[in-house]
Amino acid sequence: MTDMPDTTLTPDPSHVAEGHPPTDDAAGYYTPGTPLVDTKAPAGPISDRWQTRKFEARLVNPANRRKLDVIIVGTGLAGASAAATMGEAGYVVKSFCYQDSPRRAHSIAAQGGINAAKNYKEDGDSVHRLFYDTVKGGDYRSRESNVYRLAEVSVNIIDQCVAQGVPFAREYGGLLDNRSFGGVQVSRTFYARGQTGQQLLIGAYQALERQVAAGTVTTYTRHEMLELIVVDGKARGIVVRDMVTGAIETHLADVVVLASGGYGNVFYLSTNAMGCNVTAAWRAHRKGAYMANPCYTQIHPTCIPVSGAHQSKLTLMSESLRNDGRIWVPKKKEDCAKDPREIPEADRDYFLERIYPSFGNLVPRDIASRAAKYMCDEGRGVGPEVEGVRRGVYLDFADAIARLGKEGVEEKYDNLLDMYERIAGENPYEVPMRIYPAVHYVMGGLWVDYDLQSTIPGLFVTGEANFSDHGANRLGASALMQGLADGYFVLPHTIRDYLADGPFPEVAADHPAVVEARTAVEKRIEHFLSIGGTRSVDSYHRELGHIMWEYCGMERTEEGLKKAIDLIRSLKDEFNRNLKVLGTADSLNQSLEKAGRVADFFELGELMCIDALNRRESCGGHFRAESQTEDGEALRHDDQFAYVAAWEYAGDKPVLHKEELTYTAIEMKQRSYK
Ligand SMILES: Cc1cc2nc3c(=O)[nH]c(=O)nc-3n(C[C@H](O)[C@H](O)[C@H](O)COP(=O)(O)OP(=O)(O)OC[C@H]3O[C@@H](n4cnc5c(N)ncnc54)[C@H](O)[C@@H]3O)c2cc1C
């Protein structure tokens, strides 16, 4: 990291605005706004709410559907499933992605599996238990009605995918097999070896292509959405750049759906695909869509450790490996440099099994990640030293090989273990793997109501791009479940209630709102190309990521977050003065594409730090060092923070709207996995 100029952007305490609670660390960084209420969530018994909403949502007759245009940005599981279903229903759908094929969406990388409350193992699972596990796993910071709906439709997803031909793993007798993921004591995860995302995406893609052939869906690949068009307060279209020719195009519709994925790459190093970014969501945020809980980031415990300062990508080792692999570090610091095979059993600390005997190696991700960090902070990490610390713990398959045989392990995990060997250069069948936590997923995203509609009427958000159903921590195998639930089963019902008022008045191509959006895109591109500085986009991104990881990563403090905000602001300032983007606007230009994405990451990163500063409690993946129990576990403060933080864009000083979280079907408790 380069030296930073000293900045004095931290607000003076005397500026603390009225309306802030006295303990608000973020006072002065934001303006308190009015409370936010989800007006679409039906009342009544939790198990009836989705049925009620589906029934109450107005219908659109098939003849009228053909007159309604729907734009869907994103072809991952959330977007492809929505586009296929809306196309099948007869709407006129335009589907956008920035990859060269819808099939290359980041969802393809998902390895471990997808949850569903089928109870095939007869081990006590049910819709209610999946609902309960997910709310508890999310540390009681998710919306009860949404999570129940997710658990309810989970069972349909598996049937739908099997009907599409998704090759889920099967048991000897032919029934679908299940395994366990963290934070649960039942086996409810369906999987296709270590390629579940790929197989599910092929299913959704085939359904999408069927609609392309039927003429209901048109796909636009290598097109990047760079602006949202809002006319008379409603989302009516998008501005995109053809990434091959550089042409700027406007596309108009009756409704816009964003299924544009997560923004974990704000940290630079993450397990996300290199292209994942926040631009579609952030452009909508700047146009009025609130951003909810942006600081809730998932740090996944089982990733291949960082090996050096110039790395640009981290690799996930699926959580499914924790079914059979055992996590340990040496008991004695002096053993850390030894060959692990020479460390006797008595000198090994299986720390998750020791600290959390009920859940053992299958505690939720936030808990496993923090425990690994503490072991390394204590000096008991393994692997090569990076900046003076060994940041790794062992994930050991020796017991599993003894129990199942090498073939048994291969059958379940071979592609994952092969991938490890190719990257780490060690054979995991012989030497324990080394793993360390890394950024993996974001629970934050655009705020949506029960109908998945944002605060801009006509803008719906699905999949990882919305603030989702996972509260402050997502349980493994539930992102695929949510993306497909949203796309196949939720959005198609809720969006029709909005579309029942359409078709909306036609928007002319020269409407001032269209011209404004298009001009804004053109000017921004011009700005990046004209700076003519000396530093590459990647170097800014790397430095921003370092700030985020250091101060808004696994552990956050008031002091660190304030420092991060100052550092981000001055780095952003330098970016706008000293960025170097080569090439032109009218051709394929990856550094131009990245410039826009990194500019949006700067603004997002700052908001994440303000959000984390405001939430002086620890919950799930958000660990504030100031708020922990005596034994170092996350300590929530339900009396002060049982809300969704929904941020309205207002330049340097965002406005915070709080949506209160109430639980009627589940009692809020301090989480325990011991
Ligand atoms: C390595 C890895 C493994 C995982 N394994 C699992 C697992 O086993 N189980 C599980 O439940 N979850 C898993 N997850 C999480 C899960 O894969 C993701 O949360 C999920 O796939 C996101 O799906 P999505 O459809 O919301 O977004 P994505 O799949 O990220 O798709 C985003 C789409 O939006 C498009 N897009 C984005 N911005 C723009 C723009 N500006 N213009 C045009 N198009 C745009 C992209 O082109 C893409 O088509 C894993 C995640 C990672 C990183």
Image: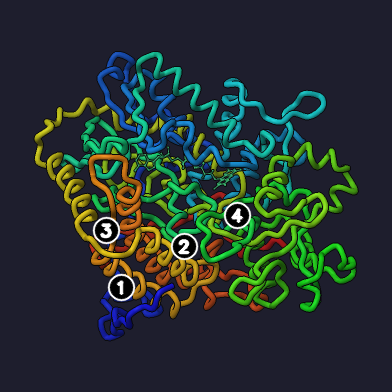
- Which of the two discs, 4 and 2, sits closer to the camera? 4
Q: Quadrant of the C terminus?
A: bottom right
> Which residue is labeled 2 in the image?
642
* SS category of the residue bearing label 4: helix
Picture layout, residue 351 above or below residue 318: below
Q: Nearer the viewer, residue 510 or 34?
A: 510
Q: Amino acid at mark 1?
A: Ser
> Which of the 4 image quadrants contains residue 640?
bottom left
- Rounded to the nearest whole Å, what is the CA distance between mark 4 and mark 3? 30 Å
Determine whether, in the image, residue 195 is placed left or right of residue 519.
Answer: right
- Rounded to the nearest whole Å, what is the CA distance between mark 4 and mark 1? 37 Å
Mark with earlier residue (4, 2): 4
- Rounded to the nearest whole Å, what is the CA distance between mark 2 and mark 3? 22 Å
What mark, if any, has residue 137 been given in the picture?
4
Q: Amino acid at mark 3?
A: Tyr
* SS category of the residue bearing label 2: loop
Q: Amino acid at mark 4?
A: Gly
What mark, if any, has residue 649 been given in the picture?
3
Dot 1: within a 10 Å radius of its alpha carbon, few (fewer than 14), some, or many (20 or more) residues?
A: some
